[in-house]
Image (cartoon, grey):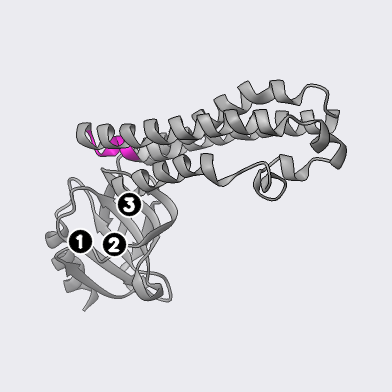
Amino acid sequence: MIYVSIGLGLLFFSMGFIITPSNAKYLLSGYNTMSSEDQEKFPIVEYLKAFKTFHIWFGIIYTLLSVIFHLLDSDLVGYHLGITPILAYGYFFWTSRKYNEGLSSATKNNTTIGLIVLSLTLVFVVGLFIWSDRESSWTYENNQLEIQGPYSISLNISDLDSISLLKSLPEITIRSNGISTGKVAKGKFKGPNKARYHLLIDKPVGEVLALYPNREIPVLISLDGMDERELYLKMKEELY
């Protein structure tokens, strides 16, 4: 995750050089949807100077914070990845409202809507982190495994085609839905060759209980407080 965060910081830095007055009408979000009248009134050169300064400094600061958070606690990198860009762009859009003076009410309203969307996104992301950081609890009774918490599951032995115990987590390439930080990986993920998984993982990962439900994606489990090997042997005996 640290490499993704550093790569994102470099992307922010490069954004200050990618957009220029000559290509802004194609690439600059907000400006490219303005009416031609508003585009003529908008101080694009002055705005892009501020845009460039913001992205250069934000790219540098974001990358440095990524490294610092990784050294302090790798879990912080996940929060940094999701929250810091929203806060930074919210600040930039708020301070950039002065460039909209003299423009149509439609353009000003779009700026206001953008700020509202960013605020709601921030609330959603913070709420998602809080919800996903809850500990998962589990029970196995009457041939049924129930895991409660973020991305919970309930599986009966009869729901399974097979089970196995893995020494390590398979290669994961991307998260499609869920949460991934330095301490947890929970939700839907993808691996090489279009492989898909439902992960319920507390890190560091030990042995992984792999469940293969009928016509469903595999569920990979490695939770704090769970003896995956003992549970695997018990479920295997009842399955076969």
Which residue appears at 34% of the width and 68% of the height? 218
Secondary structure at numbered mark 2: strand
Nearest the eye: 5 or 17: 17
At horizontal 55% and vertical 32% (from top left) the residue drawn is 89
Give the alpha-carbon distance from disc 1 to disc 3, as whole Å.
15 Å
* Residue 159 at x, y percent in the picture: 37, 71
Q: Which residues are magenta?
A: 73-77
* Residue at x 52% of width, y 39% of height: 16
Q: At label 1, which amino acid type do we have?
A: Val
Q: Is residue 206 visible?
A: yes
Residue shown at 42% from the left, 51% from the top: 178
Residue 46 in percent (x, y) is at 66, 28
Q: Amino acid at mark 3?
A: Ile
Main SS of residues in magenta:
helix
Q: CA distance from mark 1 to mark 2?
A: 6 Å
Residue 149, quarter of the rendered image: top left
Q: Determine whether label 1 and label 3 are within 8 Å by CB.
A: no
Q: Position of residue 103 (x, y in %)?
A: 82, 27
Q: Nearer the viewer, residue 214 or 121?
A: 121
Residue 116 in view: no
Disc 2 and disc 3 in contact, CB within 8 angstroms? no
Residue 15 located left or right of residue 216: right
User: What label does residue 208 carry, if any?
Assistant: 1
230 sits to left or right of 155: left
- What residue sits right under mark 3 in the picture? 147
Please tell me how crowded label 2 is: few (under 14), some (14-19), or many (20+) other residues with Cα within 10 Å.
Answer: many
